[in-house]
């Protein structure tokens, strides 16, 4: 049931002998019925829209004039019919307040939570934070997208975070539809740049430039495909020199400016081959820089864990990636003649590892397992251009079969009859 009530007038007098309003009558069943002033006459808005929400709870909203009240009620009826009804009061919560609650309820890795919180604080709240959730429209979102001044791929990540919050608001009945998913909203365009692996000379140059306690990090990254945090979290007990295997079971992370231990990315532990050359490099490193016991909290429990780390700082602590990247890695890049750019971070060692394995015939699924990727499809999308061309593989396959079964061709000037 939904209708518009006149709060200032009634069909019946409130007291005995009360006189009707001279200028107010209502036609009911073809007859004019006088209206009497109520106790609320002249106080507040005159017209009250009433309806019941999907939970059968009575809702109200007042208006100064009847026409806006009826138009509002028409919208409510239509939304109830289409199943996209939103409580007007609920939609008045600001995006800043709602997103803060959403972030607090997220069960995710602390570093991931920290990164999302930073994106909201720097790129979403300044323009959209004070908007009530229910007032966000596709045009509002598109204007915000147009104003993002960050790298395209990072902008897509920020957009995805905002869309996730607004999808939760839809589920909570605060929005009818997610404006980020409207046809008129164009998400930030993705920019796909092909991975260009370093040449072997750059790997050698970095190994020399990092001479000392960090030189073998190049071998661990380029020879085993470990992520930077996994290299810094590598313990002696994880390195099986006898079987030639590295057990990737932890990484060193920076959370709220503090170092912690945690499982590998997405909790995906794995075993990777330990090549003989890397084995020799790690053994020599441990001879010159013996492992040191390091104690750090383990995420997510926070319980202290002590392990003998292969790579430690000069102070025998876990290596802080922020210090390493700014003061060690960049200096080594310049010394090795490698451009000091974002694409030449420590992750470039993993790209080199992947390129070498693909060139050696390792299949995508196996490479994905060695790299710790959850989806081989992701590995394929990143490295497909590094795979040997299908035409070359087809030629070699046919030549390998035909070359073994077909007799050698007869050269005319040798095989002619009579010679």
Image (cartoon, helix red, strand yellow):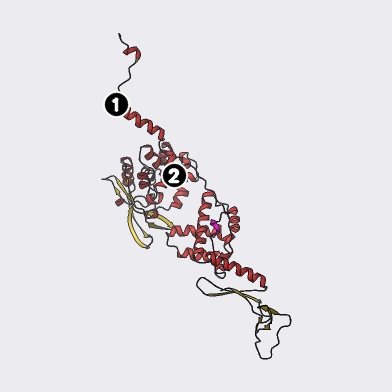
- Which quarter of the image is occupied by the C terminus? top left
Residue identified by numbered label 2: 381
Q: Looking at the magenta stretch, what is its main secondary structure?
A: loop
Residue at 49% x, 41% y: name it. Answer: 339
Residue identified by numbered label 1: 405
For the residue pair 182 and 274, the one nearer the viewer reads as 182
Q: Position of residue 353 (x, y in %)?
A: 39, 42
Residue count near mark 2 (Cα–Cα under 10 Å), binned few <14, some 14–19, many ≥20 = few
- Which quarter of the image is occupied by the N terminus? bottom right
Query: Which residues fall within the magenta stretch?
Result: 177-198
| Residue occupying the far right of the picture | 22
Disc 2 is placed on an element classified as helix
Residue count near mark 1 (Cα–Cα under 10 Å), binned few <14, some 14–19, many ≥20 = few
For the residue pair 154 and 69, the one nearer the viewer reads as 69
Whether residue 348 is visible here, answered yes or no, is no
Residue at 49% x, 46% y: name it. Answer: 342
Q: Does the stretch in magenta take in 193?
A: yes
How far apart, in angstroms, are the residues tagged by discs 1 and 2? Answer: 38 Å
Q: Is residue 63 left or right of residue 364?
A: right
- Tell me: residue 69, above or below residue 360: below
Whether residue 110 is visible here, answered yes or no, is yes
Badges 1 and 2: C-beta atoms under 8 Å apart? no
Disc 1 is placed on an element classified as helix
- Tell me: residue 267, above or below residue 81: above
Q: Does the stretch in magenta take in 194?
A: yes
Q: Position of residue 221 (x, y in %)?
A: 38, 45
For the residue pair 43 and 286, the one nearer the viewer reads as 43
Q: Nearer the viewer, mark 1 or mark 2?
A: 1
Q: Position of residue 205 (x, y in %)?
A: 42, 39
Of the image marks 1 and 2, the number of the one nearer the N terminus: 2
| Residue occupying the far front of the picture | 30
């Amino acid at each position: 049931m939904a209708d518009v009530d006149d709060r200032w007038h009634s069909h019946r007098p409130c007291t005995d002998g009360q006189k009707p309003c001279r200028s107010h009558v209502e036609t009911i069943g073809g007859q004019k019925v006088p209206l009497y002033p109520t106790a609320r006459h002249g106080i507040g808005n005159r017209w009250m829209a009433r309806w019941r929400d999907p939970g059968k709870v009575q809702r109200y909203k007042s208006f100064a004039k009847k026409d806006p009240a009826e138009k509002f009620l028409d919208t409510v009826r239509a939304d109830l019919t289409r199943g996209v009804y939103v409580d007007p009061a609920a939609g008045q919560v600001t995006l800043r307040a709602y997103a803060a609650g959403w972030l607090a309820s997220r069960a995710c890795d602390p570093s991931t939570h920290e990164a999302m919180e930073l994106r909201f604080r720097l790129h979403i709240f300044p323009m959209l934070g004070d908007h009530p959730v229910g007032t966000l429209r596709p045009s509002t979102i598109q204007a915000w997208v147009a104003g993002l001044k960050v790298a395209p791929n990072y902008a897509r990540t920020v957009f995805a975070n905002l869309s996730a919050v607004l999808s939760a608001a839809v589920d909570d009945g605060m929005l009818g539809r997610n404006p980020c998913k409207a046809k008129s909203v164009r998400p930030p365009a993705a920019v796909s740049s092909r991975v260009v692996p370093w040449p072997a000379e750059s790997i050698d140059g970095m190994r020399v430039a990092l001479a000392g306690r960090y030189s073998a990090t190049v071998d661990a990254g380029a020879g085993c495909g470990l992520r930077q945090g996994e290299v810094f979290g590598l313990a002696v007990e994880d390195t099986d020199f006898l079987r030639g295997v590295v057990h990737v079971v932890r990484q060193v992370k920076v959370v709220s400016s503090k170092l912690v231990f945690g499982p590998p990315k997405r909790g995906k532990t794995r075993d990777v081959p330990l090549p003989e050359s890397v084995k020799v490099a790690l053994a020599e490193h441990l001879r010159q820089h013996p492992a040191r016991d390091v104690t750090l909290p383990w995420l997510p429990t926070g319980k202290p864990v002590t392990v003998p780390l292969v790579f430690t700082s000069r102070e025998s602590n876990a290596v802080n990636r922020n210090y390493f990247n700014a003061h060690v890695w960049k200096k080594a890049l310049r010394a090795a003649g490698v451009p000091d750019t974002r694409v030449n971070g420590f992750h470039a060692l993993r790209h080199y590892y992947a390129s070498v394995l693909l060139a050696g015939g390792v299949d995508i699924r196996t490479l994905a397992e060695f790299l710790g990727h959850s989806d081989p499809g992701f590995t394929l999308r990143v490295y497909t251009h590094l795979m040997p061309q299908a035409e070359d593989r087809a030629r070699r396959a046919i030549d390998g079969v035909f070359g073994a079964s077909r007799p050698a061709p007869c050269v005319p000037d040798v095989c002619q009859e009579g010679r």
